Amino acid sequence: MLYRTTALAGVLAGLFAPAAFAQEDTSARAIQEIVVTAQKREQSLQDVPIVVTSVSGALLKNAGVHDIRDLTVLTPGLTVTSTSSEASVTARIRGIGTVGDNPGLESSVGVVIDGVYRPRNAVSFGDLGPVSRIEVLKGPQGTLFGKSTSAGVINVVTDAPSQDFRAEGEATYGNYNQYGLTASVSGPINDRVAASLFAGTRARDGYLHVVTGPGPRTKTRDNDQNFYTFRGQLAGELTDDIDFRIIADYTKRDENCCAATQLFVGQAANSRANIINGLHPGSLDATSTPFDRVAYSNRSTSQDIEDKGVSAELNWNLGDGMKLTSITAIRDWRAETGQDSDFTAADIAYRPSDGSNFVDFAQFSQEIRLAGDAADGRLNWLVGGFYANEDLKSRSILRYGADYYNYLAGKVLGGVPALIGLTPGTVLQQGAGSDDRYKQSDETFALFTNDSYKITDELELTVGLRWTRDQKKLDARYATTGGSCTKAEAAYPTLAGLLGPATAGAITGGLCINFENPDFDNLGLLTQKRTENEFSGTAKLSYRWNPDIMTYASYSRGYKAGGFNLDREQNTVVTAAGLDFAADPDTHFAGEFVDSYELGAKTSWFDRSLLLNVAAFYQKFTNFQLNTFIGTSFVVESLPEVVSQGVDLDFIYQPPIDGLSFQGGVTYADTEIQPFTAADLNNPSRFSSLRRLPGAQLSFAPLWSASLATSYERELANGLKFKANLTGKYTSRYNTGSDLHPSKVQGEMVLVNGRIGLGAADDRWTVELWGNNLFDKDYIQVGFNGPFQTDENNDAVSVYDAFLGAPRTYGVTLRLKY
C-alpha cells in the first residue's frame, strides 16, 4: 500500500513540477471554463460543491468512447460491467452498485441522458453519438436526480442541433472483423429552428470460440456485436422567451452474448466436471484455463434488444430571473435473450432463444422545474416536481435439457433417483422446467427544492430537500412441469434413515432446486404491493477564499427504492414429517439509504493552466441491497451496514507544451461491509452463503483506482495535423463475486488504450490508428458459481465460471468533417 501511495505522489509531483517552476506567462494556457449541470443549472465546475468528473466531447472522441462502458477508462472510481448479456449492465461508483441481472432491483448509479432518467443501467447502453460532455457525479444525488442515485449519477449531454451547417462521418475497421459506420448532420431549418440526425452501425465477431457439443447451437463465436442506432433532434425558439428541444432515438441489437469460460474446476474424482464430461466428452474445460477464450455452449445465446424513445424539453423565461423547464419523455426497452444456463456443452438447462424469455420496460416521465435568482443576486432557488410511471414485464423460462436426468443421477450418486422413484420419462423430461411471469407497475412522484444563498460574497449555503412517494405492485404467476420436489420431500425420511440427515438433506436439495419447485405453482396469482414515502436531501457550505480556491463541506442523504425479487425465493423447513421446500410468497426487500459527508476543495493554479480538485468522503449505507446469484436463481438480501470512505482527486492540466493536455484522477475507497450475524439478515439461513462478507471489502470495490488521459495535437507542414491520445486506468485487487469466494478475485491491473492520427489542419479528414487494451491484459468482469455445479463446502467438486473482459483490439478509423 505504501509503495503505491509513494509512487502515485511521485507521478503527480513530476507531472505538476513543470508548472511549478515555469517562469513564463502561463495565461495563454488557461483552461476554458468547464460548464456542468450537476445542480440542474449551468455552473462552472469549480463553483459546484460536488465531486464531478467532467469529460468533454473532444476527449470522448479522442479516446474512442462510444457508450458508458467505454467511459470507465476515463473516470477513477467508476466501473461498468456487463454479465449474462449486453442487457445486463451495471455501473458502480466508489465500489457501490447493483448487479443488473435481476430486473427487480433499481440501479445505485443513475444514468440520465439529456435530462431523461433511464430506469436501469442497461437501458442506457448504446452508441451515444456526438456528445457535448459526460458528467460523473460521485456520491448520493437524491435531491435533484431522484431515488435511484444512492451512489452517484452519469449525466450525458448530447450535442444539440446547430444553426451552422455541419456534417461528420466515420468509418472504422479492426481485428475480429470489426467495422463501424456513423454519420451525423446538423443545420438550420430556418432562422429559429435547427435539426440534426445521427445514424450508426457497428459489428464485430465474438471474442470467444465456442465448443457446441451435440448442439443444437451452430454458432461457434460468442460475445459479438451487431447493432444500429438513429437519433434525430429538433431544437429552436418558439418565441424570444421560449426554446425547445425534441429528441427521438431508436437502437436495435441482434447479438450473441454471453457465454462464459471456466474460472475454476474441481479435480476430484466425483467432480462436477467429470460428471458433465462423462455425458459428452469435452463438454467443459477441465484444465481451467479461462483466457484461452474457449467457451462451452450447446444452446443459443442470441439476444434481440430494442430501445426507443422520444423526449421534449421546453424552457420558458418568465422574466425577473425566473425560468420554467419541462422535460417529458416516453421510452420503451425490450430484451429477448437466450441462454445456455449450465455454461457447458452438455444439455443440462437452458433459456429459449425464440423471444419467449424477455424483459420489457415501458416508462413515461415528466419533470417540471421553476428556477430563479433574487434581484440582489444572493439567492438562487429551484423548486420542482417529478412523475414517472414504469411498467415492467418479464417472462423467465428455464428448461431441462436432454442430459439433465443423467447429470443429476451422476451428481447424487448411488442410484438415489431410482431409489425414490425418479426415472427418465416420468420426471425431469426434456423441455420441462419453470415458466414464471412477472408484471410490475412502479409509480413515482416527487417534490424537490434546491436553493443556494450567499451569506457573504465568499460564503454560500446550499440546502436541498426531496420527498419521494414510490408505489410498486407486482403480479407474479409461477408454473412448473416435470418437477421432482414432491417425491424428494416425501423420500426424505427414508433417505435420512439410510444415509443420515445431512446427506439426505444434500440429496433432496439437489433434487429440489428453486426453479422446479412445484410449491410455487400453488401460490396462484401472487400479488404484492409496497408504498414508500421517503425524504432525501443535502446541505452544503462553501467558501471561496479567492478566485482560485473554493472549499466546501457537505452532507447528503440518498435513497434507493425497495422492491420485489423477480425470481423464485424458497425457504427450507425441517419438520417432524421431513424436509419441506416451501415457496416463499413474500419476495420484497426494503429501501436502501445512505448518509454521506464530504470535505472538498476546488482549486486552480498557474493562471488556470491546472485545475486540481480533491475531496474526502465518508458514506454509510444501511439496508444495502445485495443481489447474489446462487447458481440457478438470484437472492436479494439487505446487509445491515456498508461503509465507504476515502479520497477523490481529479485534475486537468495544460503544460507548457503547445497542444499537450492531461486529465485524470485517483480514487481511494475503503468500502467495507460492517460485521453482521445471521440474526441480522431477513433470512438467517442465508448466512452460510454470505459468511465471508462480515468485515470484508465489498465486491467490485478496488481500494485504489486511477486514470490518466494524455492528448496531443500539433500542426505540421503542408496543412497537416498530428494527433495522439493515450489513456490508462489502474485498479487494485478486488473480488468480482457477491459472495467473495476467493476464486473470483481479479488482481490489480492496468488497461491502456491509445490512438494516433494524421489529418488536415482544419479537421476535414483524419486517419487514426487505434488500439484498446494495448498490452492485452487478461481480466475477468464477473466470477460466478457454475449453475448446478457448485458445492460451497467442497471446492474439489465445484465449478466456477467467469465473464471475461475484452482482449486487445486494434484498427483504423477514417473521420470526415464538413
Image (spheres, rainbow, N blue to C red):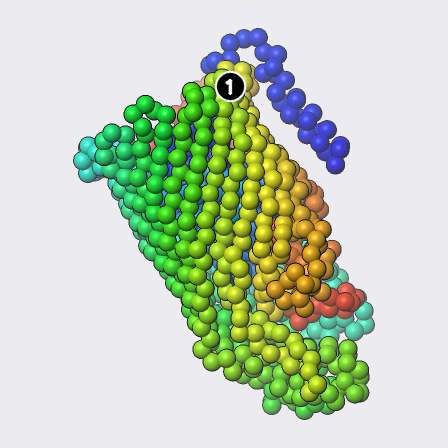
The reply to whether residue 249 is in sight is no
Residue at 66%, 71% in the rendered image? 788
Q: Name the quadrant containing residue 465.
A: top left
* Residue 681 relative to residue 253: left or right: right
Above or below — where is 348 with respect to 31? below
Foreground residue, 66 or 465?
465
Q: Residue at x 52, y 56 (%)?
A: 591
Q: Is residue 692 visible?
A: yes
Q: Is residue 473 above or below residue 250?
A: below
x, y percentage for residue 363?
Answer: 36, 57
Left or right: 718, with 661 as reference point: left
Q: Secondary structure at mark 1?
A: strand
Q: Nearer the viewer, residue 763 or 37?
A: 37
- The percent coordinates of residue 326 (x first, y second) are 29, 44
Q: Which residue is mark 1?
A: 545
Q: Amino acid at mark 1?
A: Trp
Could you say which is closer to the camera, residue 12 or residue 387? 387
Q: Residue at x 36, y 31 (%)?
A: 380
Q: Residues within 10 Å of mark 1 (few under 14, many from 20)?
A: few
Q: Position of residue 601 (x, y in %)?
A: 55, 27
- Residue 671 on image: x %, y %: 65, 45
Give the quarter of the figure containing the C terminus: top left
* Res. 670 image quadrant: top right
Residue furthest toward the front? Answer: 455
Of the 4 image quadrants, the one containing the N terminus is top right
Residue in the foreground of this view, choosing between 718 and 313: 313
Residue 209 vertical placement versus 51 (above, below): below
Residue shown at 62%/84% (left/top)? 484
